[in-house]
Amino acid sequence: MDCLIREITLSDDKIIEQIIRNCLIEYGADHEGTAWADPDLGRFSEIYNTDGNKYWVAEVNGKVVGGVGIGKLEGTTEICELQKMYCLPEVRGKGVSKKLIEVALEYSKNYYKKCYLETLENMVSAQRFYEKYGFVRVFDAPVKTEHFLCDVKYIKDL
């Protein structure tokens, strides 16, 4: 599948927000304690535009089909967070997520020593995907995030 990975623009913000919301509904995570209630959802082009913070979208045939972000974590300068990685169901398993995560991890190496992420227990395929890229499940989060219902945590050395 021919896929273009590029930095997010203002015109992508609402599209990515809708993709994320649809995925959260799909997994029953459309409530407080998940990305659903994140006040920055839909403002990615504004939020992810400083050193150490970046968001990319995946485009297939001119259509935005997913995205991923790398963001700073409060209280640490050595660990970043892989944030809001979601893809439309029709592109899952077709290499789009692979391209997204590779771009994000390569970028994060320039700023951080480790990469952290949170997901949900019922997102089993996502967990397998993260493990494939060297993420190791941990039970104690290195920092506290606002996504208190994300019950599965991973970290990876960069």
Image (cartoon, rainbow, N blue to C red):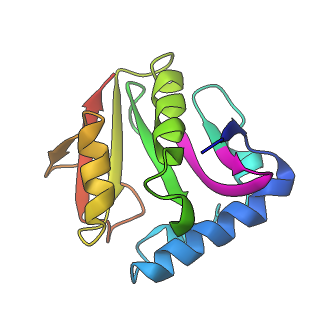
Q: Residue furthest top?
A: 110
Left or right, 96 with respect to 15, comes to left
Q: Residue furthest left?
A: 139
**Residue displayed at 54% across by 24% down:** 107
Left or right, 142 with respect to 55, comes to left
Number of disc labels: 0
**Residue displayed at 54% across by 46% down:** 96
Left or right, 150 with respect to 42, comes to left
Q: Residue furthest right?
A: 11
Q: Eyeballing the image, is 62 above or below 53?
A: below
Q: Looking at the image, which is closer to me, 93 or 109?
A: 93
Q: Eyeballing the image, is 139 above or below 29?
A: above
Q: Eyeballing the image, is 53 above or below 65?
A: above
> In the image, residue 120 lies at what x, y percent?
30, 67
The N terminus: image quadrant: top right
Residue 120 appears anywhere in the view: yes
Q: Looking at the image, which is closer to me, 19 or 139?
A: 19
Name the magenta segment's main secondary structure.
strand
> In the image, residue 14 lies at what x, y percent?
76, 66
Q: Is residue 70 magenta?
A: yes
**Residue displayed at 65% across by 46% down:** 58
Q: Looking at the image, which is closer to me, 157 or 94?
A: 94
> In the image, residue 13 lies at what x, y percent?
76, 58
> In the image, residue 133 lies at what x, y percent?
30, 35
**Residue displayed at 34% across by 21% down:** 158
Q: Looking at the image, which is closer to me, 149 or 127?
A: 127
Residue 74 appears anywhere in the view: no
Which quadrant of the structure image shows residue 88? bottom right
Residues shaded magenta:
57-72
